[in-house]
Every structure is written in C-alpha cells, then in structure tokens.
Image (cartoon, rainbow, N blue to C red):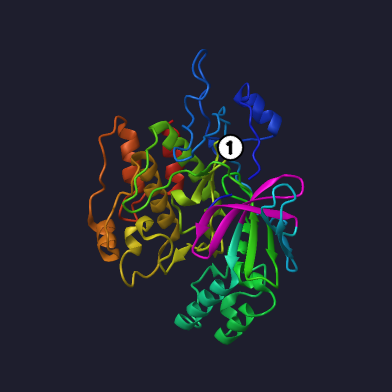
Amino acid sequence: MAEQHNHAQQHPRSHSEAEAAAGIVPSHGISINLPETAPGAQANSRRPHPVKHMSAPAPMYQSPIRHHKRAPSKSKGVKETLNARSHYGSSDDDGAAVHRINQYIIKQEIGRGSFGAVHLATDQYGNEYAVKEFSKSRLRKRAQSNLLRRPNRPRGAGHLAAGLGFNSPLHRLSSSDRVKQTEGNNSLELIKEECAVMKKLNHNNLVALIEVLDDPEEDSLYMVLEICKKGVVMKVGLDERAEPYEEEACRCWFRDMILGIEYLHAQGIIHRDIKPDNCLITNDDVLKIVDFGVSEMFEKQSDMHITKSAGSPAFMPPELCVAKHGQVSGKAADIWSMGVTLYCLRYGHIPFEKGGMLELYESIRSDDLPLQQEQDDNFEDLIRRVLDKNPDTRITMEELRVRHQELK
C-alpha cells in the first residue's frame, strides 16, 4: 500500500543547536542520532541506498537526525465526507479519461490490496496524495461472513472495539443490528475500525489519514492518505527474491520501525501485519508504516493480549502458528514480525519458506533460523533476539531501544 507530502530536511550544524531550536528534549537519553559525517567523507554514507525496485530512484538526501518524543495520544481532525460526488470525464488537454472524487483527481494505480486499489491523486492545488479505494460490496460480504462465524463473541478484558470514537462498540450490538448497521446509509461503518485507529495516530513514522469520502451513488469508499513517493521498502514474498540492503541501511530502516511501532504500542494499538509491503519510503528516505486494517486497539493499561490470528502467514510468530493457541502477547507478535521484516531487508527473502500453509507454520515453529555469515556479531545477535521463538524470552521494545543504540 502506498502513501505523504515530503519536505527535504537539512542536517543540523550540531545536535544541541538543532534540539534547542526545535524545543526537543530527548526523554531519558533515548534519541537516536546518526554520527556527524567526517570532513571529506561522502555525505550520505550512512543512509540507505535508493529503494532497489524503483525504476528511477530519486537522488539521495542527507540523513535527517531523528528524535522521538513520547507524547500523549491525540486524535487528529480527520475530515469525513459522506456526500462526496464522483465525476467521470475526459481531459481537456489530451482527451484521456479523468476520474474525480470531490477535489481529488484519481490517477494511476500504485498499489493493490484484498478489497481495492491505491491510486496516486492530486487536489486542485497540485498536492499529491495516496487514495485507498474500497469496494463497499466486498466489505459488506466480509462483515456479514465474520458475523455468521462469530455472531456475539465477547472481547477480552482491556480490549476496545476499534470503532470507539465513531459509535458504540461493536460488541454491544446484536449480530442482526450490526448487519443492518453496515447496510445503512453511513457506509463509513464498513471501515470504521481502520479509521478509528488512524485517527488516534500522530507520528512521523506512521502514514497519516487526511480524509475519508463516501459517494452514496457509487460502490467505492475512499481514504485519502499522505503519500510516500518511493513506495514499499522491498517487494518480497514466498519464492520471491529481492536485492538485499547493507547492514547500515537495515539499521536505518529498522530504527524507523522501532520508533513507529513503539508509538503504536504506547497508544494501546497492535499492528498485526508488519511486513515490507506495509513499510513505505518518502522522498526524504523516512520509513512510514501503513495499513491498519487488521490492527487491534486496547486500553493502555491492559496487557494487550490477542486471541486470533491475523496478517500475513509468513510473518506470523510461532505462538500464532498453532491451533487453539489462546491468548498471546500482541506486543511480542509485532516484534517478531518486525524481525522477519528486518531479515528480509538484510537477506532479500523470507526466512521460512514452504509451499503449503501447514508446512509453513511447522517451519516457523520448529526450523532453525537460517542465517548467512555476518561480519558483525552484534547484528546477528540482534536478529536472533528479535526472532526468538519463545515470546516470553523474545526481546522487548524497551530492550530493543537500548540494543539498537548500541549497534550504531
């Protein structure tokens, strides 16, 4: 999935001057900074190479020094337009077909998911966005199918309906009421959970939601998101290879993942589908996490346990690859998926590759982690700690923060 307006960032003259000017005071000494470039050295030597699969990569940028300030959750003002209007016509310039939804001109497809496509779009001022399009009919079928399978399943302690903030929690309604609700006039109910999660987020390493539009006369719903022009960090899958990144590039991307997922967890949200396809790169070489369609929201004081499997099988942790697994730590599950993503970036393929689903799950649970010989023992140890098959001894986000700074 793709998604930002981007601004080139200048490298500060010194850390202290930049922090003072921005009013940033790192908490507990946890800011993650790149070292200053030595005189005469290549300015971008510690930045990732341009995204490998792009046909025409943009020129390299000086690395911004990234800080993380732990801030309280704050809902953003996301516009909801229930009476949007679609227009189909032709361009005055060349006669090509033009699709417009309100002020957004929908252009070429730049990504695709299970319920629709993602398009590049521009507004009347020429600003670019990523517009995620959903099929309402497909969403209704999914909602009704889920209700038939689990009509009134209670949620665990501390678990919130992600729609809280839009309407009453889903689990307080009967199954028939919920079906009627999704068939009502407010089609935004169909994507309320993903919208509710995204409205709660405000972080530089998470893609921002700008507006949600519904044309009552059309089958499509639209989410307008900030765009990340360089696309996904890597295209990789079962039996699909990609050119790997160098260690320093992997550390840079992994640092951005840590900052984004740490913030998510602090807001009581488990992502549940972390993978390279959901890590997008801006023109300024900042990694942003996207796609909160299967995320779960909890009360912050809860232990954030999940009880069902979701996301991409190749990125699932061992504890979710068993039948009747019961409650497992959502935080530990996200950290495993981060580890599989890091492995893909470093080696260009998924660590556990099997053709059948049962064989894949057995491999994730039982097979040793296949690693190439690493020059840096610390880097190898990091991957092993993140991909610890035991969730109780798997590295935590707090330990990961400290450990990643040691690896700079």
Residue 299 lies, in percent from the top left, at 56, 64
The one nearer the camera, 17 or 343, is 343
Residue 228 lies, in percent from the top left, at 58, 44
Residue 320 lies, in percent from the top left, at 35, 64
Residue ranking furthest to the front: 95
Report if residue 106 lies within the magenta region: yes
Highlighted magenta segment, given as a residue range = 103-131
Q: Residue at x 46, y 80 (%)?
A: 150
- Residue 329's quadrant in the figure? bottom left
10 Å crowding of disc 1: few (<14), some (14-19), many (20+): many
Q: Main secondary structure of the magenta part?
A: strand
Report if residue 82 lies within the magenta region: no
Residue 379 lies, in percent from the top left, at 35, 36
Disc 1 marks a residue whose amino acid type is Asn
* Residue corresponding to mark 1: 283
Q: Residue at x 43, y 65 (%)?
A: 310
Residue 115 visible at all: yes
Residue 72 visible at all: no
The one nearer the camera, 384 or 108, is 108
Q: Residue at x 35, y 51 (%)?
A: 394
Residue ranking furthest to the left: 367
Circle 1: element type = loop
The answer to whether 195 appears left or right of 346 in the picture is right
Height in image: 100 above or below 8? below
